Amino acid sequence: MLSVNTNTGAMAALQSLNQTNAGLEQVQSRINTGLNVASTKDDSASFVIAQNLRGDVGGLGAVASSLGRAKSTVDVAVAGTEQISDILNQMKAKAIQAADDGLDADSRSAIDADYTALKEQIDTIIQSSEFNGTNLLKDDAAATGRVSALQSLDTTSTLSVANQAFDTNVTTALGTGLGTKADADTALTEIDTVAATLTNTLSTLGSASRKIDGQLSFNSKLTDVMESGIGNLVDADLAKESAKLQALQVKQQLGVQALSIANRAPQTITSLFR
């Protein structure tokens, strides 16, 4: 039936064109953002899961920062302890020299001065082995800070490293000079005791550093897996979207043409009245 009031062909063409335009708008949005799910309106389940995972990724970033600070603090303490160990070997050599009962007073005095200078150097290293306000070599954790880093998203799980109390276990323990042979013998005993302390400290700090490295590596891999999971949930396949875009552009052009043809159909009615 021909009618000037109702053009069903044009209405059908217009509906089809509107659907094409909506599809084109969606594809262009996916190409612009790179996301298949950019809003909860696209896919509520995927969007909510992705948002939760993004929160976890951000949390792991904070954990990595905490572990990084802990590692730096421990590595500074390791460097200080290794340097003290080297100096202690020099002190032992001086003490053995001073244990020679045949030394004259001037030689013994010179050795004692060198020994005292080495002790002062150890104290300087202890005081300087600090990172971000934390010094693991000192014994006053309340004043110098302590290492207690987050290990995971569970904030109750922390990685702690005890302060090594070198103020007492090293500086105070090396209290005897080399003024006499007896003093030298006492100093050798003190040096052996401190050497054992340093051995234990190096073992403790080395183990802590390796543990932190392992946790950092695991958290990095976990972050990569989560980010990959987010991508699988919400990222758009741009090759597929590109093909859709070309198809919809052609469909849009055809739809415009179809609408134009349908709009001209009522004009044929006028020929019936000529």
Image: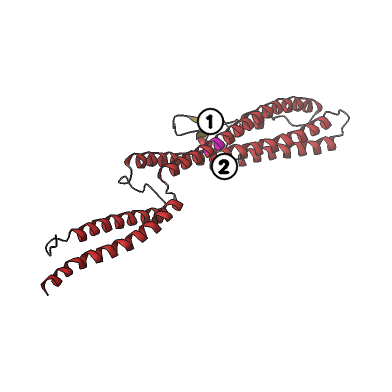
Q: Which residue is mark 1?
A: 160
Q: Which segment did they paint magenta?
A: 215-219
Where is residue 56? Give x, y as percent: 43, 38
Query: Which of 231 and 254 lies nearest the eye of the viewer?
Result: 254
Q: Residue at x 25, y 63 (%)?
A: 259
Among the 4 quarters of the image, the one containing residue 193 = top right
Where is residue 143? Give x, y as percent: 51, 36
130 relative to 197 in the view: left or right: left
Viewer-nearest of discs 1 and 2? 1
Total numbered badges shown on the rendered structure: 2
Q: Which residue is mark 2?
A: 131
Few, some or many C-alpha atoms within 10 Å of disc 2 (few <14, some 14-19, many ≥20)?
A: some
- Is-magenta flag for residue 216? yes
**Residue 123 shows in this picture:** no
Quadrant of the image containing the N terminus: bottom left
- Above or below 253: residue 223: above
